[in-house]
Structure formats: structure tokens, C-alpha cells
Amino acid sequence: PGRANSTVTGAWSLDGKRILFAGRKGGDDPGRFRLYEVGVDGRGLRALTGGPGDPGCTAVPPMRWRADGSLIPDAERRAVDYDDVDPVELNFTDRRVAFASSRTPVVGRDHARRSTTLWVLHPDGRTEPASANRNNDRWPFLLTSGYLAFSLWSRNREVVTADRTDLRPAEPGVDGATRPTDAWLGAFTQMPGGHFGMLVKPPVPVWRPRPLFANRVTFMTTFGQPGDNPPLTVVQAP
């Protein structure tokens, strides 16, 4: 009971003695992803999020039903209907952990994907948001500067009208002074919150940015068009 049978996005602790990861239970009811840690010798597995004192979502998530068709009560949905993934330990003596989560149950314009934002887990179990993207922030990685690098999905279906007097949803065949955005970028932020900016902004998607030597950045991307199923490629940018 309580064992994580499906795991993703593992990361070493800064002292090299533990592994942080996201996991969920197996079986017919796999549940949602929560954060765990375990010693490198396989001992001491414990849950970091999703416990009795975890408040869960910041608001009631989209309506959900049980397998038998009954509606899940609001309080229960707030407590369980979210995923915590991508844990990374921060360089604080109290072992805070940054992670990505769908605890803010926002759905962006023109799509049904739940947003994921960056969060911080404190040693006492408190969680607090560290970003506020209505789309997706994923894959945080601690830089030697103490900042976090991460992937940011910038998607905005609103454009400035052609006469530059208004901001409206983009419509096919209607010209505008700007174009809607839809791109994965490499960003950075200070922990706790403070400075924020773009780490790398090429004309291709930026997934899982990681630092290299001489201020270079490596990341996963693809050079194909959506729907072509192009292969993933690892590249670097100056």
C-alpha cells in the first residue's frame, strides 16, 4: 500500500544521497502523480506531496465522475485532481523542492489542456506557486547561479487589431497587427520569485533546457511540422 508503481521525472538530491521523482499507484486505479523521495540504496521511500495535510488545488478542478458515474464532491476533487511532476531540489539548507503541477486548474483559450505551473514545496509540507502560466511551465532545472531554467509554453490566441485600437481573439481570415503565439521557450526565474526572463528563444520548441559550458544551453526539440511525427533531437544554442 502506498507504493509508487509508475514513476517519471527523477532527479538527484544536491547531497547525492536521495532521488526525487514523481510516481503514482498502479492497478486499476492509478490515481494522480505525486512527489516522492527514496535513498540511493532503495530505502526510505516516502511521499512528499498528496498527504492528509496537502490542500491540493487552488480552486475546484473541472467536473469529474467516478467509474460508476457518480459525481466526485468538490472538496474531494480539490484534494485529489492534480498532478505533481518534475521535482528538483533547490540550493537552500532547508531542502525546498521546486516542481511542476496542475494544482491551478486553469484551461487555456481554445484548448482543453490543464495548465501546469511551477511550485515550491517547503520542508513543513507547505506549497506555494512560483509561476502563473495559463498554459504550461515544465521541467525545472537548477542552475549554478541559483536560478531555475524551465520550458514555458507561450500560447496566446489574442491579437492586436489591424487599426491597433483593440485586443481581440484571432479569427481566420481577419488581419491583425500581431499574430497569435504558440511556442515552447526556454525561460529562467529566481527562486524565490524575483527575476524572470528568456533563457533561449529559437524558432523551434525548447523542451528540458539544460546548461552547458561557456553559457551555452542544450535542449530537446524537433524540426518537423505538427502532425508529421518528427523525431526528437538534442541541440545546443549559444
Image (cartoon, rainbow, N blue to C red):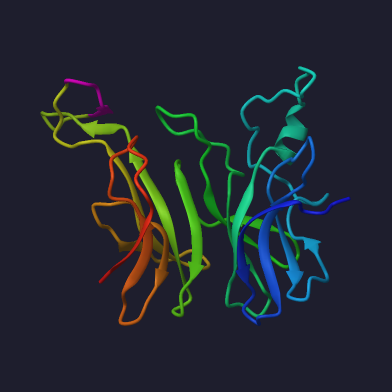
- Residue drawn at (27%, 58%) of the image: 201
Q: Quadrant of residue 172?
A: top left
Magenta-highlighted residues? 167-173
Image position, residue 117 (x, y; %): 52, 50
Numbered marks: total: 0
- Residue drawn at (50%, 58%) of the image: 139
- Residue drawn at (61%, 28%) of the image: 62
Left/right placement of residue 26 relative to residue 114 reads right
Residue most extreme to the right: 1
Residue most extreme to the top: 69
Q: Is residue 124 above or below residue 74?
A: below
Image position, residue 229 (x, y; %): 37, 40
Image position, residue 38 (x, y; %): 76, 68
Quadrant assignment for the C terminus: bottom left
Left/right placement of residue 168 relative to residue 42 reads left
Left/right placement of residue 204 relative to residue 71 reads left
Q: Is residue 45 magenta?
A: no
User: In front: 231, or 99?
Assistant: 231
User: In front: 53, or 214?
Assistant: 214
Left/right placement of residue 70 relative to residue 188 reads right
Image position, residue 76 (x, y; %): 77, 34
Q: Is residue 168 magenta?
A: yes
